[in-house]
Amino acid sequence: MRIGILTSGGDCPGLNAVIRGAVLKGTEINGQEFVGFKDGWRGVVNGDILPLERSNVRGIAKQGGTILGTSRTNPFEGNGGPERIQEILDANGIDAIMAIGGEGTLAAAKRLTDAGLKIVGVPKTVDNDLDATDYTFGFDTAVEIATEAMDRLRTTGDSHSRCMVAEVMGRHVGWIALHSGMAAGAHAILIPEQKTSMEQVARWVQSAADRGRAPLVVVAEGFMPDHEDDPHSERGLDAFGRPRLGGIGERLAPMIEDLTGIETRATTLGHIQRGGVPTAYDRVLATRLGMAASDIVNESAWGQMVALRGTEIVTVGFEEALGKLKVVPQHRYDEAAMLFG
Ligand code: F6P
């Protein structure tokens, strides 16, 4: 069996560990051969193929990014589509595709599988918002990076008696904000799932300042104050047609300053959260997912992806991954909110 691997959508620490896990298990145990598609679905549609042998994955588990490159190309657009992709596979002797990606990638993979292509999936999202898996690789790394940044923001905030606002990723869900905010002892955590009034935010900030603390407010990029209906976006659309987010922290800072009179500064962590080496946890999770993805190819589990349930790797259908977002449940927010202010 010859398998083509692709990484698609936003990159995420741990992608290379998945590739290595799949190639090592596949070549050593499962009798498989591998190639890589360059830049996600773009490489599939254009037949842009890279060698992927054991020697190509040496030492890459600790390397950030993806050695295959990525893009947000939709395989149905332009000259794409199932017939074109099957032609490319046949011309290169490729039997199956292993697609490593998030919701958009898996939705495309499902449509292609429904059209008869042989595809398995590995879920990827730094935001940790896919419901079919308990955790996604990359999330732990992003939380570590964000927490470290917040620890730093707190010492400069303390020195100047300022309120510090830290903006983290989280388009639809606030998992990175919740975990890094709790870890850093934030005085308020603002997430897309919980609309909050600016007066409430100001009360939390004031209460921390009244105790002599420099307030730390953590905000996910998709957060909406209760008087707004859409997340803050000022830079157009991305390749999937979604608004490019980012900048809500800079908007909140003057509002907090006006309401409390406390000098306030905002920092947007942005893509720093997605870059660099994965944590040990993410390397292990990603490696296990890659190995399991090689196994399910041998089982001809087309239209299925590997996922984490508890501490075990399981197999679920693409439709399960696409069904609903894994939002921060109310009780997890309430638990964190007990410590605000
Ligand atoms: O979907 C993951 C994510 O990290 C979001 O939190 C963010 O809005 C988006 O990707 C930004 O990605 P890019 O700048 O690569 O389009």
Image (tube, rainbow, N blue to C red):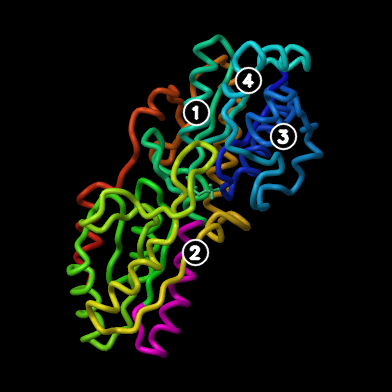
Q: Nearest the camera: 175 or 79?
A: 79
Residue that mark 1 sits on? 106
Viewer-nearest of labels 3 and 4? 4
Residue extent of the magenta highlight: 142-163
Judged by depth in the image, the label closer to the viewer, 4 or 2, is 4
- Foreground: 91 or 259? 259
The front one of 151 and 206 is 206
Secondary-structure class at tag 4: loop
The amino acid sitting under disc 2 is Leu
Q: For mark 3, what is the residue?
A: 38
Q: Residues within 10 Å of mark 4 (few under 14, many from 20)?
A: some
Specify whether residue 79 is painted magenta. no
Disc 2/disc 1 C-alpha distance (Å): 27 Å
Mark 1 and mark 4 lie on one chain; the one further toward the N terminus is 4
> Which amino acid type corresponds to the residue marked 1 in the rendered image?
Leu
The overriding secondary structure of the stretch rendered in magenta is: helix
Identify which residue is drawn at 34% across, 58% down: 178
Which residue does the numbered mark 2 point to in the structure image? 269
Q: Which residue is mark 4?
A: 80
Instruction: Look at the numbered discs 1 and 4 and tell me whether their residues touch, using CB distance below 8 Å.
Output: no
Which image quarter is the N terminus in? Answer: top right
- Residue 284, can we see it? yes
